[in-house]
Amino acid sequence: MTQHYVPPSEVALSIDAPDWPSKLLKRIIERDGLIVPILVYNYSAMSPVGESVFVAADSRQSERVMACDELGFETILIEDEWEEGDL
């Protein structure tokens, strides 16, 4: 398991990301915090300068990234080693 703390602005959204996070999700995260890591793909090997390139795994993960960004989280916990069943 590889986890990192990164600013939400450093995580790209998936192609199927919603236009904005739901109000319910934002209220839940605001009340409870981010309980589990956001699952991302790590495309660092494809970066020409070797920097970390993280992309949210699907629309749900993207929505969580957007919600945390809108709520002003300075960093979020992401995980880039996971299996499809974890989604």
Image (cartoon, rainbow, N blue to C red):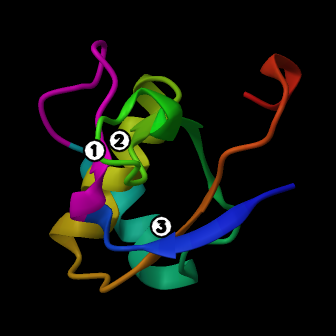
* Magenta-colored span: 9-20
**Residue 7 got which mark?**
none
Please give the residue where the numbered disc 3 appears in the rendered image.
28
Please give the residue where the numbered disc 1 appears in the rendered image.
22
3D distance between C-alphas at marks 2 and 3? 13 Å
Q: Label 3 crowding class (10 Å Cα cut-off): few <14, some 14-19, many 20+?
A: few
Q: Label 2 crowding class (10 Å Cα cut-off): few <14, some 14-19, many 20+?
A: many
Residue farthest to the front? 49
Q: Closer to the camera, 52 or 69?
A: 52
For discs 2 and 3, the disc positioned in front in the rendered view: 2
Q: Residue at x 48, y 23 (%)?
A: 58
Q: Are marks 2 and 1 in contact (CB under 8 Å)?
A: yes
Secondary structure at badge 2 equals helix
Q: Position of residue 2 (x, y in %)?
A: 77, 58
Secondary structure at badge 1 equals loop
Assign the N terminus to one quadrant of the image: bottom right
Magenta span dominant secondary structure: loop
Assign the C terminus to one quadrant of the image: top right
